[in-house]
Image (tube, rainbow, N blue to C red):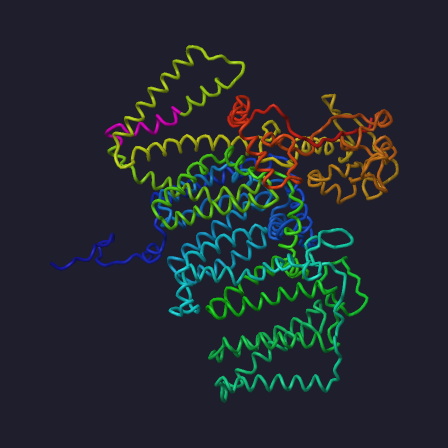
Amino acid sequence: MACRRPKAENGRRGAVSPLGGITQRLPRVGWLEAAFLALLAVSLAMRLWELDGRAMHYDEAIHLHQSWQLANMVEYVHSPWMHGPLQIEMTAVVFWLLGDTDTTARLAYALFGVALVAVPYFLRRYLGDWGALFTAVMLAASPALLYFARFGRNDILMAFWSAALLTLFWRYVHEERDRYLYLAAGLLALMFATKETAYFVTLIFGGIAFLLALPHWAAVATRREKLAGAAGPAGFFLLLFTLTLPQWSALGGMFQDLLGLDLLSRGGESTGIVGAPHWGGPELLLPVAAFPPAIHGLVALMAAAGVVAWAWAAGFPGRGLAAAVLPPLGISAGAVALLTRPLGVWAVDGFICLALAATSAAVLVVEPRGWRSRLAAGMILSGLAAVYVVLFTPSVNLAGQVHALLPTGINVMMSSNGIPWNYVSALGIITALLLASLVLGLAWRAGVWLTCAAIFYSLWLVCYTTLFTNWAGILTGFWQSMGYWIAQQDVARGNQPWYYYMVELSVYETLPLTFGLAAALYFLRKADTFGLVLAVWAALTLAAYTVASEKMPWLVVNITLPFIFLAGKFLGELLTRVRWKTALRHGTALILIIVPAGIAVGVYLARDYLAEDIALSWPHWAILLGLALLAVVWACLVRAERAGRGLALTGLGLAGLLLGFTLYSSLRAAYTFDDSNLEILAYAQGSADLKTVYAMLREGAALSPDGRIPSPYQGEGRRIPSPYEGEGQGGGGMGNPRVLVDYDTWYPFQWYVRNETDSGALQHRCFKEENAMDWRSGCVAPSQAGDTGAAALLIAVRNGDGGPELEETYEKSGPWGDLLWFPESYRRPGENRGEESVWEELRQDADFFRQQAASRRAWESALEYALVRELRDDWYSADFHLYSRR
């Protein structure tokens, strides 16, 4: 029977809707897509709700103040102690578009946190639909991810880049589409411009890709396959290795003692900027030999003749000969033009170099035959030409080039046309690794690699030079980004114990930690490749951050991420193993309720048992008996299920309980702004008092036109005369600030008073007694601060209270909180890890753990903190006093 064409709605057969082609191309919105859209909406609300509620953190204030200055056209200079430049530039754009407020300061980070929740959708084929959804739910609810998505630090950006890189990696392994390589190249550039933890991510993913490609490497070693054209995990490894190889240049500085150089300065006047080569010591004087002009001309002719001879021997006759010769000569001429003129003269240099580059590219496009060899010849010849011009001609103005690279106001002493061997060596290492990556990339897949390299270095240069306004960012990006953190390993900021992240994970991320560990064993037994990749990612990430000397609470974001992906895939598989119709019909679905109920009752009994002031009574024994009966019912229901479905239901019930606890922990940590909850996530966190004191100053004489400041002891504000009234100056200007703030309370208060500091209404001063250990010239003793004539003073408690002399003129209030640190009750008493060997540290930690495990009080404290955040200790706080003129 012949098929009949469908009848159109207007009654005409075969009519086609004009939107039919478009609607067919639109993505299908099924239950999974609807669930993700709903989850993204909830995540957006969670991350934007009262985004300005928490006081600024110390690091937030530093980063955001830099962004505010950049938005106001103050030159920004990349410094690796504040990590990559991307977050500074990104937030500056937000400030420029939307204005500078506490909300806009954190807005971009919050949006990255929302985008992170969407990433599992693009891995749904490999996580499973339910696994992708479970992963996204945990990403949305995670206490660490939610807290630091509402926080002006770049760790949430790194979490997004890492998850996106995993997605591109695994999709390329299975689909082998070049677009994933191009996207990965851009993502790598942004990742390295975000934070130095990019080295960890690249090393881990590169190691995984290398191991997955072992069969290919074996085939290459036995000449059964070629390196050229490698795809899958081998191709992705080569992309990561070649693009990021120059970023590892500073590792060469670890051998500086053998070379007698100072490539990774430790800081101080004698050694220079931390992590950078020291500008000093023996110099390479240029030129090393001065040849007459005739020799230079002869060398140029010989180079040109050599290129022609190479082209003829390579088989480029006729028109192809000219096409083969022009690109190498053009590229070399461009390199010479850059070297022989100051880099700042863009009107000339930019035109010359762009013209030469455009001409060379046009020739390569018009005559594409043999373009790889011609491009390689151009790179080699330009390198040789640059070395020759630098070493043997006086045309390179080294001082002019160096000062053109340096930011405004920064100079170095150059007594002659020479460069320290420290910098010669560093530049040599960078150049060698750049050439090695180029050669290997061209040998792999020349066209694809050059496109990837163009994407990577374009974005990288834009970020590190801050849109070509800071050329020194090239060196700090290539060398000091890693060099600074190598030099800082001995500092071990935070000085946390090696088990620090396990404490954080066990408090906040119980759900991904519990099911991530179970998933690793499950996928190992099942030999699930992607599951094992996630398990290795989680294990290596935890190991890397455990070994690294600097440990901070925000770094737990990077550790939590792989555990969430691992646990999400596992939970998705547990759910698909259950036959839900059968479980509902037979009643075994009750396991989902029995398991969390039993655990909740068990925790209640444990809490009462551990409490010293509660004696167990007959109701407790009755509850314990009921709990035992509940366990019997659970065992019977598990037995009634087959093939492990009962255990799957048990796991899902436990996951539901832990998810509820996770949400409770997230909401408590993210939306409590009054310093009442002692959270391990808080470290050098600004106190809520800072916003209160700033509001008082804004409402009072110090920083408002009407000259009123509320007394902390009265309900209404009262008049405080400005010390500058009648002088016609209005309290502004740098010579007569109305408020003086102790340098020891600089950040994060600096963020709140940025406009007042800029206008001169507020200044920071050094308040210290003259006999203080860190007293220096220019400091003022608190007892003499009244002589400054300011309307208000903020003096750190550690620097004294000023005594009766100051209180004769000022009314004292406080102490007010400045910075808060978690009391760190998880530490071993009397520890001195900087002076302990590794084995001594582990031995003492083992003794400490045994003592804590046998201590009823320790278990009670841990349980009380986990449930209600109660501790016997209070914040460790750096405080200040506010002095308001009477």
Instruction: Point out the image quarter for the C terminus.
Output: top right
Could you tell me what secondary structure mostly forms the magenta stretch? helix
Q: Position of residue 631 (x, y in %)?
A: 34, 23
Q: Position of residue 473 (x, y in %)?
A: 66, 59
Q: Position of residue 163 (x, y in %)?
A: 47, 49
Quarter of the image for residue 757 reads top right
Q: Is 81 placed left or right of 568 in the picture?
A: right
Q: Nearer the viewer, residue 150 or 131?
A: 131
Q: Nearer the viewer, residue 667 or 546?
A: 546
Q: Nearer the viewer, residue 199 or 800?
A: 199
Q: Relative to residue 325, is residue 750 depicted above or below?
A: above
Q: Position of residue 426 (x, y in %)?
A: 66, 63
Q: Nearer the viewer, residue 390 or 409?
A: 390
Q: Is residue 594 magenta?
A: yes
Question: Residue pushed farthest top?
Answer: 618
Question: Residue pushed farthest left?
Answer: 1
Q: Relative to residue 358, is residue 574 depicted above or below?
A: above
Q: Is 56 placed left or right of 515 in the picture?
A: right
Q: Relative to residue 123, is residue 768 depicted above or below?
A: above
Quarter of the image for residue 704 reads top right
Q: Is 380 placed left or right of 419 in the picture?
A: left
> What residue is drawn where x is 36% and y is 34%?
652
Q: Relative to residue 81, is residue 728 depicted above or below?
A: above
Q: Is residue 751 magenta?
A: no
Q: From which residue to which does the magenta span run?
A: 583-598
